[in-house]
Structures are given as C-alpha cells and as structure tokens.
Image (cartoon, grey):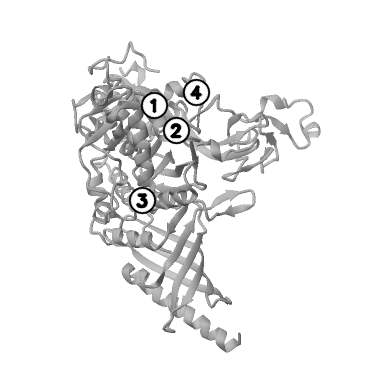
Amino acid sequence: MNDSNILSPSSDTDATPLPPLIPADAAMGEYRAGDLLAPDGSSVDRRVFVDEGLYRLEQERIFAKCWLYLGHESALPENGSFLTMTMGEDPVILVRDKTGRLRVYLNSCTHRGARVCRVDSGVTTSFKCPYHAWTFNTEGQLASVPRLGPVYGDKLDRSLHGLREAPHVDSFGGMIFASWDPQAPTLREYLGDMAFYLDLMLDRMEGGTELIGGVHRWTINVNWKIPSENFAGDHYHVSSTHGAGVEMGYRSRLSNDGYCIQTGNGHSIGSERGGAQQGTAVKTDYDAFIAQMRSELVDRYGESASAFVPIGVGTIFPNMSFLDSARFRSFRVWHPRGVDKIEVHSWCLVDKAMPAELKAAVRKQYSLAFGPGGIFEQDDGDVWQSVQDNLRGHIGRQGRFNYQMGLGREAPTSSRYGPPFPGSTSDILMTEANQRAFYRHYASLMADPRCKP
Amino acid sequence: MTDVMNTQLWTAVENFYRRETLLLQDRRYREWLELMDGSISYRVPVTTSSLNGLESSEDELGYYDEDFELLKARVAKLESKQSWVEQPPSRLRYFIQVVDVTHQDDGLIIARSNLLLLQYRWNMEQQFSGGRTDLLMPREDGGSFLLRNRRVVLDRQALGNQGLSVFF
C-alpha cells in the first residue's frame, strides 16, 4: 500500500521490519504529515485525536481498507447463522449462506437505506427491510419486492439491487475478518508475522479455541486510537493506572523484564515475563494449564520460548486488541463512534479441551479484571475519558503527545529469543516502540502520496 | 400463609433492602458483604438481542459473575486509594421497589424487585434500571436475612459509559 518512491526508507537495520518513516511533506487531509507526527513516530499532535477531518479520512483510508475483525466461527455454527457488527461506523451483517460460505453485507437496504437486520444474532433465511419490505436472501440477492409488477412494471432490475457486499471475507484460527478494499492483500498477508504469535494464542491445545457465549458491550468517550495504542504496547501505565490491582494482589508488581514486539503493518504484542495478571489473590487452576502449554512450547523451540506463554497484550491494526494473560484470554474491538467515542465489544476465549469448571472459572476471572466493570478495565476507561475531555478546548488541542520511551533499543526478535520468533523487539518491557510503529503505519495509510504544496 | 404473616414477611424483606440501600449508597462495601451467605452467586448477565427479544444465559458472560471470594476481591480493589474510577467517589442514589415475595417450601424467600440507580461521577453521570431476583435465607438467630443468590437483568443492552464501578 505504501508508495516506496515517496516514503523515505527506514533508517533502522534491514532486519527490523519497522513501518516506513513518515514523510514530512506528505498531505494528511488538510495538514502536512510533518505538522502532525515526528518522522519516527516519537511524537503525535493532539489534533490527531480530535480533528473531525482526520476522523473522516480514517473512515475512508483505514476502516474501509484494512481487514477488520467481525466474529468467531464458533458463533456461526450452521447455514443461515448470522450476527451483526460494525466495520468502522458501517453496520454490517456477517452470515453463513445456504452453501456455508461466510458473507458480509452492509446492513442497509438498497432502496432507501433502512437497517434490514436489527438484532445481534440468530438464524434466518432472509433479511426483510421494515421500511418497504424489500427482502434479501442470505446470498445478498434482492429476493422479493412487494407489488413488483404493479408499481415498477419491468423497470426494476432486481439483480442490480442486492445488498452491498464486502469483497473479502476470510478467517484465521477461527477468527473472521473482512475488508471493503477490492485491492486488499490476503488476510494472511495482512496479518504478516503477527500470524505466528496469534497462532501461539489460538492453537495452543488440541481442538483449538471457542468463545464463551455473550459479548460485553460498553462505550467510552475517547478516540479509538488511545485504547488501540495502549494495548499495542503501553506497559508503563500499569503501575500507576492499575495500582489498586497490584495492591489487592490480583497482579504482581510490573517488572521491566519482557518484550514489546512489532511485526509490521501496525500490529504488535508485548508481555512481561510470565504474563500479565500474575498475583496471589483469587487463583484458579489455569496456572497448571499455562505451565503445561509453556513446557510444550519449550519442547518445540527451546528454553527461550518460555517467555511466549502466555503471549501477552497486543493490537491487530487498526482496532482489534487482545489480552492473553496468566489468568484468561480475551479480545476486543474498539469500534469508532465519532472522533471522540468508541463502543467496545469484548469476548472471552477458552480452549475447547478445557474442563467445564475451568472454563467457568476463567470466564469469571476475565469479567472480574477486564469486563466493563473489571477492576483493571474500570480505571483504564476513566483515565482515557479524561484524556479526550482535555482535548476539546482551543488550548487543549495544541501540542504533541510524547512517544520517545525506549528509543533506539529495537533489534530483531530472533536476536534475543532465537528463531522462529519474528518481528523486532526491545530489551526492556517499558518502551513505546510499539506505539511508534502503530503511528508510522497509521501515517503510511493516511498520508497522501501527493505532497502538500 | 395468612395475610398477616404475608405482611410481616414483606416488611422484613423491605427492611433488609433498606439496610442494604444505605450500605450501598454510602459505599460501605465491607458491611455490605456481611449481608451475604458465603455460597452466594451474584450475577448480572449480558443480554443478547435475538428475534425473540432480549435473552440471557447462565453459562454466558456476565457484567458481574461473582462468588463470595470474587466479590471480596472487588471490594478490596475499590477500597484502594489508587482505585481511580472512584477518585473522587461517585454520588449514588438507589431506589428499590419490592414487587413480589414468595415463601418457598425449604424456608428460603424469593424476592423480586425493581432497581433504579442514579450515579454522578466527577466526569460523567448515568442511570441504570433493571429487575432483581434474590434468594434470601432467614438468619438462624431469627433476625433478617442473608443473600444467597442475586440475579439482576439490566434494561440497557450496552453499558452507556466507561468504568462500571457500582453494585446492583
């Protein structure tokens, strides 16, 4: 997607797949890229989180282009199973059609635009618009139009009025993604080396993973990039924001021993050694499972692989994040709802082969820590909202956020952990390397190859 | 059950909720825990919008999905000076309306109530409404009850704001 003639080559070593440096003279909406971001991503202007024009451009260049997470295969067990979701702000239906193929449609009637499906999930053979009763089948075709002959004669070609369909739908490890971009790379190419780490999270036990039923939904008045970059690599906030969680023993004090890996395309992951949420309060038998999985990975890749179970917290660019901790696995999407608001959808993932009692215990642990009322989540949301509140004023939107932490400490992950671990990492946990990679990739999508005069 | 006995039971149940309301409003959560039986299940399930209306299930996610130990862990967290979500503390106003009380053969009481909760926090305000179904166990010393089971179904499907930090 990047135009290598325009974007400067990375100054980092060839072995570290950092996104390209940000070309200062490229246009980014009404702005010059250099007026919004430092070339290496080490500072980002506050307007990037509050400017309406940039937000509209993100809808076009990021959310209508990137692969976005939509749902888990275990939630669509039979032909006709569907769920509703959004891609950016666009409402969509994900459905398994009559032949079992996964399809994604804009949840909007082609006649006058009304929502054709109003519920979260179910099983159906058709979607009937409540406005004028145009009805679409699971293949997206306009199957029936009331009074077709008497009111349209032969003027309406139904074959031209099927639901708008996303050209690409694919899944990885049970996770279904879609893209609106006809030119999109394959999902596997898009995930790139992050696929290796996702695999460590999703394919840990024989039989794979499944979702716990239900989804946590809540809103936070914050720009979507603040939580996305937080999960990408903000370990530094843990000691302060989550001081209460440390104090009551749910997690141990944060150490600086760990990795922050970015794998290109804005994707990244990080973990302190042993995983987040190591603590002595309210323990479950999950510890034994983690120890077993860790020893299996060490058998495969050698002793240094012990650092990679659990795999940690990370972000699949742009707005899907996950948390594979010492106590549970969960993932979430930060759906933008305007420049200053998100709706979070969050799920809990377990291995199918786990005993039922352990699945229930893990479900409760996830809710306790990272559900909408989670003892960690509740403080993140509160602080993030205060960030956004502070950008509203004329003065508050001036200046830049700083991302210099850990500058210059990145090296190929394999140089620290050996093969096969891809991407680049730092030698300390508390670095903003992943956030810099996030914004460099962000800028490469947002910048117009035509320079700002 | 005679009308007189029934009235006494309603009064006892309402007295229990009056005491609980004061504890929750004042965020005296340690004392609130004393109202609970050690085997309590405290659940606020998520709901899914389906073609048949809102549905919830016992083995699916909950906003709250607690046993006694997990509730104690939540209380310990909220008591910390670093619990930012309640720094400064919210002002809370609970309105509990008992709508049905049933005496079971095993001596336990099923009490259904409507909940309205108004919350004002330094950076936001929100309200919750929902239906509570409680299982109350008469205390052995004859006074009041212990809460054995609580299930609250909220009317809103997505929580309207960040940082859920109140109990229902």
Local SS, label 3: helix
> Closer to the N terminus: mark 2 or mark 1?
1
Q: For the residues marked 4 and 3, what is the alpha-carbon distance in whole angstroms? A: 36 Å
- Name the residue tied to disc 3: A369
Left or right of residue A151, residue A138 in this image: left
> Closer to the N terminus: mark 2 or mark 3?
2
Left or right of residue B75, residue A174 in this image: right
- Residues under numbered marks 4 and 3 in contact, where contact means CB atoms less than 8 Å apart: no
Image quarter (top left, top right, bottom left or bottom right) of the C terminus of chain A: top left
Left or right of residue A422, residue A161 in this image: right
- Name the residue tied to disc 2: A203
Judge if badges 1 and 4 mark residues of a common chain.
Answer: yes
Image mark 4: chain: A
Q: Which is nearer the eye, A449 or A312?
A: A312
- Name the residue tied to disc 4: A181
Mark 3 Cα within 10 Å, few/some/many (few <14, many 20+)? many
Local SS, label 1: helix
Q: Which dot, 1 or 3, sits closer to the camera?
A: 1
Q: Which dot, 4 or 3, sits closer to the camera?
A: 3
Amino acid type of the residue that numbered disc 4 sits on in the rendered structure? Asp
Amino acid type of the residue that numbered disc 2 sits on in the rendered structure? Asp
Judge if badges 4 and 3 mark residues of a common chain.
Answer: yes
Q: For the residues marked 2 and 1, what is the alpha-carbon distance in whole angstroms? A: 10 Å
- Residues under numbered marks 2 and 1 in contact, where contact means CB atoms less than 8 Å apart: no
Kindly tell me whether residue A324 is visible in this rendering.
Answer: no
> Closer to the N terminus: mark 1 or mark 4?
4
Image mark 2: chain: A
> Closer to the N terminus: mark 4 or mark 3?
4
- Name the residue tied to disc 1: A196
Local SS, label 4: loop
Local SS, label 2: loop
